[in-house]
Image: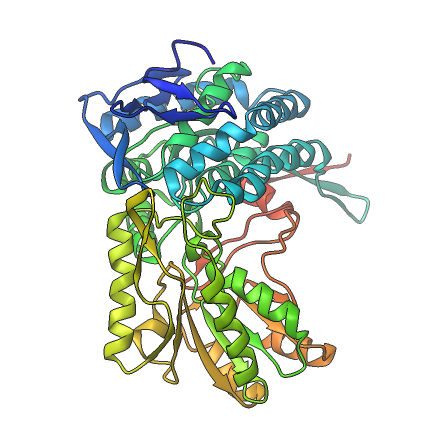
Amino acid sequence: TPKYVRTFNVMQSEKGAVTSQKGTIMNIKNFINNQFVDAVDGSTIENYNPSQGEVYSTCPASKIEDVNNAVDAAKKAFSLWSQTSAQERADFLRAIGHELSIRANEFAEAESLDQGKTIKLARSVDIPRAIKNFEFFSSSVLSKSEDCSSIDGKAINYTLRKPLGVAGLISPWNLPLYLLTWKIAPAIAFGNTAVCKPSELTPLTAFMLAEVVKKVGLPEGVINMVFGYGADAGRALVKHPDVPLISFTGGTATAETIIKDSAPYFKKLGLELGGKNPNIIFEDCNFEKAVETSLLSSFNNQGEICLCGSRMFVHEKIYDRFMSEFIKRTESLVVGDPKDENSFMGALVSAGHRDKVMGFIEEARKEGSKILTGGEKVVVKGCEKGYFIRPTVIETTSMDCKIMQEEVFGPVVTVTKFSSEEEVLQYANSTRYGLSASLWTQDVSRAHRMADKIDSGTVWVNSWMIRDLRVPFGGMKASGIGREGGEHSIDFYTEAKNVCVTFG
């Protein structure tokens, strides 16, 4: 890596990843117009290693002036980037993906250090998916076609897909590189330039991605990274008059502010928000597969995935048997050092988030729900200051209590018994969210009936988290606005222009 990029004191691990030295602090910088710079006012944010509970880095606490500089760079770059050929843009995307694959281990260890997830998970899911995002959209931009139609031999209409300009991309802390690249890749593939505002809690892999962008020679200003708090940098990006498009993944409450702030500018919005997803298990399920997959959908990535099946509904005929096995396997899950290959769960992203999750658990106790297992913090040897919580299963019968209505975003799953399709359908649709759902049944007719009636943007049948980048992804109700993926990403990151040509 070029010396001018590495502005912090580091040491190399055995696998080549960058890790913080004892007693040293990484200095992460903004990336504007292909230059690594501090915030204009010099202010910074301390970043914590979740598994150690200690500061490992600082990143800029960017404000309006920093965002303005990034937007100016992106706006200037747009006039040239939007005119490059699809092949040239595809080549750049493939080059970025290739560099990520070369540094995959380094990125996986950095994601774990920064976010708290296990290295094993980052290596098998987060980084491969980030690479795939660039590969997929490098192909998409080469295969897209335009619509054409004629009017009784008198005229012909054809549609052009034009990039909008500067795309404002705001990504969350749970899958930092995975979801940031899900936005960057289509945005630049279809001719836009980008100003990215990653979560201030997890800036490291975004910063490292900027290194890759510089190394592959992407033109100045095409991708810019501005770090900082959402209320400062994020809001400045949303309100900037020269940013016509905002793609945001995060909380529903923040999205409400984004809608209000962007309304005077009539911006194009893509909002992928929270979920309170039902996982419905019928009596005729493939029992082993349902139990094993439900463990993943409940607790993978410490439950910090918007698609987690956080409300589990189990048919009364198999309830006792299913819960006995599910609890036994939950209690066998290893909560430990993210670097340990035996750890299933790492640390939650921050002390504040850990306390928020514990607050949900305590509130559930007070409301009369039964804690079947877990519900407590965990002290991990060698990581005594880390933010660990034991995977928690809560039995409840009320659909109105807080634990059943609000997104916990942690290793907490509720379980409720049901007796009929009608009853569980009412349960499933009883929240304001509608992101995803899982159904477990061998009855094909039942699967289709239920999938049709559940208010969710995605319904998995006898599976969970099977992702095809060609299909529409997004939520219903308070889980979001718009769809991305495949043709839907083309729709979102471009404007359709119709041209009508008459004959004679």
Residue nearest the observer in this picture, 135 or 305: 305
Question: Which residue shows up at 37% across the image and 61% down it?
Answer: 390
Q: Nearer the viewer, residue 182 or 280?
A: 280
> Measured from the top left, where is residue 30 in percent x and y?
33, 23
Hey, which residue is sitting farthest front in the picture? 381
Measuring 65% from the left and 22% from the top, which residue is drawn there?
Answer: 91
- Provide residue 353's location: percent of width, then percent of height: 28, 53
Colour scheme of the rendered structure: rainbow
Instruction: Note whether residue 330 is visible.
Output: yes
Foreground of the two, 461 or 137: 461
Number of disc labels: 0
Q: Is residue 324 left or right of residue 37?
A: right
* Position above or below: 499 against 17: below
Establish if 392 lies above or below 167: below
Residue at (40% x, 44% y) in the render: 337
Residue at 21% over, 28% down? 44
Whether residue 435 can be seen here: no
How far from the left and from the top, in percent, is residue 333? 48, 59
Q: Compared with residue 167, is residue 82 higher up or lower down, i.e. above or below?
A: above
- Tell me where residue 451 appears, x and y as whole percent: 62, 73
Toward the right, the furthest residue is 153
For the C terminus, which image quadrant? Answer: top right
